Image: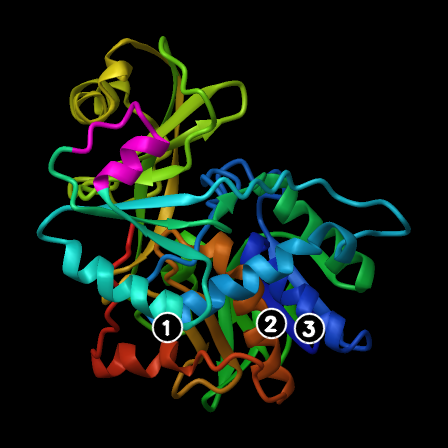
Amino acid sequence: MKKNLYDVVIVGGGIMGCATAYYLLKGDRNLKVAVIERDPTYSRASTTLSLANVRVQFSLKENIQISQYTIQVLENFEDEMAIEGEKPCIAYRQQGNLFLADLYGRGVAKKAFELQKDLGCSVAWWSPSEIKEKYPLYETSGIEAGTFGFKDGHLDPHAFLMAYRAKAKFLGADLVTGEAAEIGSVKGRVTDVRLSSGHSLGSEHIVNCAGAWAAEIARTAGINLPVKPVKRQVFAVDTKVKPDSPLPLTVLPSGLYFRTETGNLLLVGKSLEDDPVGFDFSWDERRFTESLWPELAGFVPAFDTLKLIRGWAGLYAVNTLDSNAILGEWPGLKGFFLANGFSGHGLQQAPAVGRYISELITGKSPALDLSIFSPKRILEEKPLSEAEIV
């Protein structure tokens, strides 16, 4: 078996893997880093199939701080990722996020809002009349309040990923096309990543950034992660009535969400209890016509007439313990680091997590303490509390 030696081997070349490689090499150009990705077209990557939302509207302090850092990064991202004068274009649009609360959820929303304000976030608490004034198409009966994040927004996920990938390569990362088949270890320490091709990449530091496939990778090292691939569907529709201005990502108390997309379309989605677990990328228009459309038209009556243009499905890497990230070195297996279980928030958390994992590996003091997401809580079955899961 041929073995190449690296300081760090990253399994998974999506946004998390490429961001981690970038921060490692930004800190030390002499590191030898490999990023393994089995599909460099990213046709089924959660990154490229996401709505690419960025928001500070969480209820857990560390999740808010993670997003604050991402927004900070995005302000100068295209300059930072420039290669020999060529800048990427990620089309970052800060059109805001609007989270709506009913009577049942008002208290939780208020508490989260106050925490966001205390941390310096640019957020506002709106009454139903204020919401109606800003978005006249919305039917606000039953809505008690809304929180609006002024710096929240969305971007081009493929461009975002490619920028990190290209910069990591420019800084010296080896981008390896292949399928990780097994994590090798000896006496409680990782030794290598064995590929299905028969090759092996040796390292004392291996990072699991495999997204929806994270549990499969961990299982080869004898670790059971509570991470499942859950199919989520998104639908693009052309409404007969057009809003006067772009609509922010609007999240109803039920979890239904929608926002304006390029081409004056509307993207609509909702996480449902019966969303299937598994590696299934099919989409079903009946999910929209029978479940989502009636609810959408109830909140925006003008959208009772529309045309379904297309749809797609991607995977959430759902942490079934608490829907929050699992970050850090796995207890009992030295050198095996996890960046998993983001439950739909991976893209917006990649900058802070990539930096954090790189700091843990290189022994630097973390700029942002994310130890609350340690894998120890998985073994101890101590879930974190996060109210703003979409």
Q: Amino acid at mark 1?
A: Lys
Q: Amino acid at mark 3?
A: Leu
Please rate how many residues cluster around mark 2, counting C-alpha atoms within 10 Å: few if below 14, some from 14 to 19, many from 20. many
Closer to viewer: mark 1 or mark 2: 1
Residue 384: x %, y % from top left: 26, 73
Name the element at disc 2: helix
Please rate how many residues cluster around mark 1, counting C-alpha atoms within 10 Å: few if below 14, some from 14 to 19, many from 20. some
Q: Amino acid at mark 2?
A: Arg
- Is 271 positioned to the left or the right of 348 in the image? left
- Is 2 positioned to the left or the right of 132 in the image? right
Q: Which residue is mark 1?
A: 61
Start-end of magenta stretch: 128-140
Please rate how many residues cluster around mark 3, counting C-alpha atoms within 10 Å: few if below 14, some from 14 to 19, many from 20. many
Residue 182: x %, y % from top left: 49, 66
Q: In the rendered structure, find residue 24 and report the number of the disc placed on it.
A: 3
Q: Which residue is mark 2?
A: 355
Residue 133 part of the magenta-drawn span: yes
Furthest residue in direction right, as rendered: 84
1 or 2: tag closer to the N-terminus = 1
